[in-house]
């Protein structure tokens, strides 16, 4: 028979642990917050990318793009992509303003028409420049735009990772959910699976060849987005990363699209 004093002592020891235990939702959110916290303070950056589009038959189209990014205090990041090659897309520029709440703002400058076209928020799931990336994939990660659920621990290439489900809270997303793999050492994204509105696997994006900048910030130098439903894929090779180059809000205005070179 257990004495009352022993029972009370046992309850006093066990109950606080039970009450303080994280739920899968709380742990998923905590992991997302830590990943975001490790990528704050980089200011602005520039990089170049080689984007390779592959159809189901393996035929390739290669595009050269320059990318500029600006960290915004109290809101999502701003991004500008300028296409240099091939000739049929040269001068095309894509501008994106991510917001913590509400719809993001995106514009596309088409040099042949010499005008800036606003991308409707209802077209977030549309393809970005014919690639397997959607327009919504080009926005910065903002914690408030998702709900979370931790699933399990796993391994990717021998590294321990956290696996969590993310459910978009913003309107017009083309995804019902995504599942992300983040390594436990640096909270870097290693893989994301995207599910369509019917909850079927649509795309898989992998990240590799990470390099560290400013002794703190990790950037993947290769991203591959595979559409498992169509057999198409898009790979991006990043190069020439530069930080704190002096970019300002003026470099990310709608008028800057027309003069982007």
Image (spheres, rainbow, N blue to C red):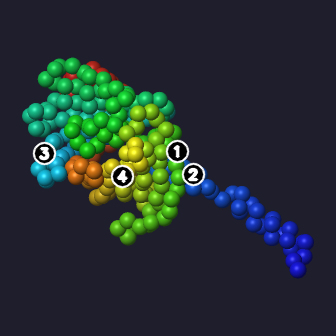
Give the mark nearer the N terminus: 1 vs 4: 1
Q: CA distance from mark 1 to mark 4?
A: 19 Å
Is disc 3 in contact with disc 2, using a CB cutoff of under 8 Å? no
Question: Is residue 49 left or right of 194 when viewed as pictured?
Answer: left
Give the mark nearer the N terminus: 3 vs 2: 2
Q: Which residue is at the front of the view, 82 or 148? A: 148
Report the mark closest to the observer, 4 or 3. Answer: 4
Q: Which residue is mark 4?
A: 201
Q: Which residue is mark 3?
A: 61
Tag of residue 174: none
Which quadrant of the view contains residue 257? top left
Q: Which residue is mark 2?
A: 25
Report the mark closest to the observer, 1 or 4. Answer: 4
x and y percent of residue 216 in the render? Answer: 41, 52
Q: Which residue is mark 1?
A: 147
Give the residue displayed 45% in from the left and 66% down from the top: 154
Is disc 4 in contact with disc 3, using a CB cutoff of under 8 Å? no
For disc 3, the neighbor class at 10 Å (few under 14, some 14 to 19, many from 20) is few
Give the residue displayed 45% in from the left and 33% down from the top: 171
Question: Is residue 96 left or right of 168 when viewed as pictured?
Answer: left
């Amino acid at each position: 028979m257990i004495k009352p004093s022993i029972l009370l002592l046992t309850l006093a020891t066990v109950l606080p642990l039970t009450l303080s235990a994280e739920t899968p939702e709380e742990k998923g959110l905590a992991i997302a917050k830590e990943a975001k916290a490790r990528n704050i303070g980089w200011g602005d950056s520039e990089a170049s990318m080689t984007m390779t589009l592959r159809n189901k038959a393996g035929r390739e189209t290669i595009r050269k793009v320059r990318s500029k990014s600006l960290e915004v205090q109290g809101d999502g990041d701003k991004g500008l992509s300028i296409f240099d090659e091939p000739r049929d897309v040269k001068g095309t520029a894509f501008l994106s303003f991510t917001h913590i709440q509400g719809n993001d703002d995106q514009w596309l400058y088409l040099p042949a028409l010499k005008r800036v076209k606003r991308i409707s928020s209802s077209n977030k799931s549309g393809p970005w420049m014919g690639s397997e990336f959607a327009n919504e994939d080009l926005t910065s990660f903002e914690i408030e735009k998702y709900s979370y659920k931790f699933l399990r621990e796993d391994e990717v290439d021998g590294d321990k990772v956290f696996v969590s489900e993310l459910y978009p809270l913003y309107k017009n997303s083309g995804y019902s959910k995504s599942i992300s793999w983040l390594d436990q050492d640096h909270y870097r994204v290693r893989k994301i699976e995207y599910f369509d509105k019917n909850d079927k696997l649509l795309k898989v994006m992998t990240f590799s060849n990470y390099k560290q900048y400013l002794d703190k910030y990790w950037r993947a130098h290769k991203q591959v987005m595979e559409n498992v439903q169509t057999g198409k894929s898009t790979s991006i090779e990043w190069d020439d990363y530069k930080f704190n180059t002096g970019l300002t809000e003026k470099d990310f205005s709608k008028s800057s699209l027309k003069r982007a070179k």
